[in-house]
Amino acid sequence: MNSRVEIEQTHKKIYCIILDGAADHKISCLQEKTPLEVAFMPNLDFFVQNGMMSRIEILPSTHIPETDSGLMALLGYNPIKYYCGRGALEAIGRGICQGYQYYVGFRVNFAAYDDGRNVLNRRTSRNLSENELKSLTDEIISGIILDKYPGVNVDLLSYGKHRGILTFYSNNIPLSGNVSNTDPGFLKSGYFSFPVENYDNKVLKCEPLDDTIAANVTAEIVNDFSEQAHCIMEQSIINSNRIHQGLMKCNYLLLRDGGSQHISMRKFAEKYNRRLAIYGELPCEKALADLIGADFYYSKELELQLDKVHLVQLANKLTESNAEIVFCHIKGPDEPGHDNDPIGKVKAIELIDRYFFGELRMKFQKGDIIMVSCDHATPCEIGIHSNDKVPLLVCGNDIEIDETIHFDEENAERGRGLLSRAIDVMEFLVERSK
């Protein structure tokens, strides 16, 4: 058994660090290793060598976790019971629908469709510039006319190369999230969406999924909005310039994960008798914090860059927080996973280790506990989330040490950690911090 290094017992603080989509499959260009196996991580490995690892399921194998459902599970709330859909959480997190009786939110992809070749690129090759994305968003919002639906307001927020949040809200027209996706890549079932392996290269019409007036009206509004947005984007100077540059024009919005209500959740402080602070980048995370009564701080609001100054500052914010549990979601590894960029994923992980975990290691105190895991896997070879189990590391106050030496999937499989489900992690950490 290894001996402890610098880490003893007295209860202080719990650090929960979530590396978005870092878990992966073995990749040929990495000599049949995963990005985590290849990455040089001396600071994170310090915690590994003074703690224990296991491999956990984020959601039951029948479901594919997203960031919001994965974080919910790691916070100790079972998504099968509490999840209300990404669209609802994004709308709540935006805050604009407060005070309105009805609202519905959707996730959005800014997409490209080539009629001549019948090719749909669901992410517009992920090469929209920040200015292009903002200009298209501004043109859509200024050009949309919803006069047929008096009292219905619309908000569109775009970010991260191709992503967005679309919200409709009203005091007099009922709205419902129980409508189908227009994104052919995902099939909606209840509050969850599931990837479709082979789909037609066409944007779908939104259909009501029940017979209520609210669902029928919402589907009609979505289809009207989508068609208007398509026409506006087709005529945009942005797309004229992209065509001139030999790039795909961004001419469709793909909607999925519609949601219009939340499920009441027990407050975190009541459940665990601890004060919680969440550091994240997305409105859905803010909504989750609001629903469980946690403090929320945008770590880098809607930006995905990994710069060393930000990572050092973020680590310092966690150590300086007055909360007993700090929960931090770091987006960096997920983007290269979606882009099938294994080398970029390795670099992102190494940056996080050098600047974030390096700073956190220096500030780590006796009695503290650190947990490191992923909200889901994003294997480079498939470019979307998967339901693979992910590594879990726990280190600190009275935590047993096993023989694991590196933060990766294989070491996690060999670890002697007792946990196998994300929803059990928080209770374990709180019990060990007493």
Image (cartoon, grey):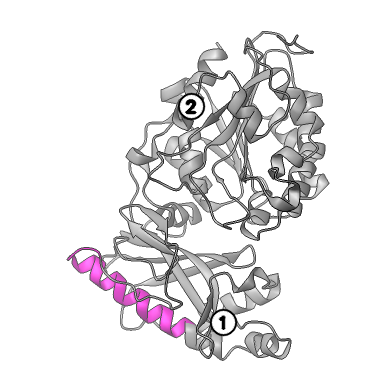
Q: Does 401 appear above or below 248?
A: above
Look at label 2 and name its amino acid.
Answer: Ser
Q: Are marks 2 and 1 in contact (CB under 8 Å)?
A: no
Q: Is residue 267 left or right of residue 101?
A: right
Residue 365 coordinates in the image, percent (x, y) = 74, 17
Quadrant of the image occupied by residue 227 = bottom left
The rendered magenta stretch, by its main secondary structure, is classed as helix
- Residue 343 rendering spot, x and y as whole percentages: 76, 53
Mark 2, secondary structure of its residue: loop
Residue at 26% x, 72% y is: 217
Side of 72 where 316 appears, left or right: right
Where residue 122 sits in the image (x, y, percent)?
Answer: 53, 71
Mark number, residue 139: 1
Instruction: Indicate the quadrant where residue 189 lies.
Output: bottom left
Q: Which residue is nearer to you in this view: 133 or 91?
A: 133
The residue depicted at 35 percent of the width and 48 percent of the height is 262
| The quadrant where residue 135 appears | bottom right
Is 174 part of what is drawn in magenta? no
Q: Residue at x 30, y 59 (%)?
A: 101
Tell me which segment is drawn in magenta.
Answer: 209-229
What amino acid is found at the position of numbered circle 1 in the picture? Glu
* Mark sitting earlier along the chain (2/1): 1
**Where residue 85 sits: x, y (%)?**
39, 52
Looking at the image, which is closer to me, 258 or 298?
258
- Per the image, label 1 sits on a secondary structure element best described as helix
Label 2: which residue? Answer: 420
* Neighbours of disc 2 within 10 Å: few (<14), some (14-19), many (20+): some
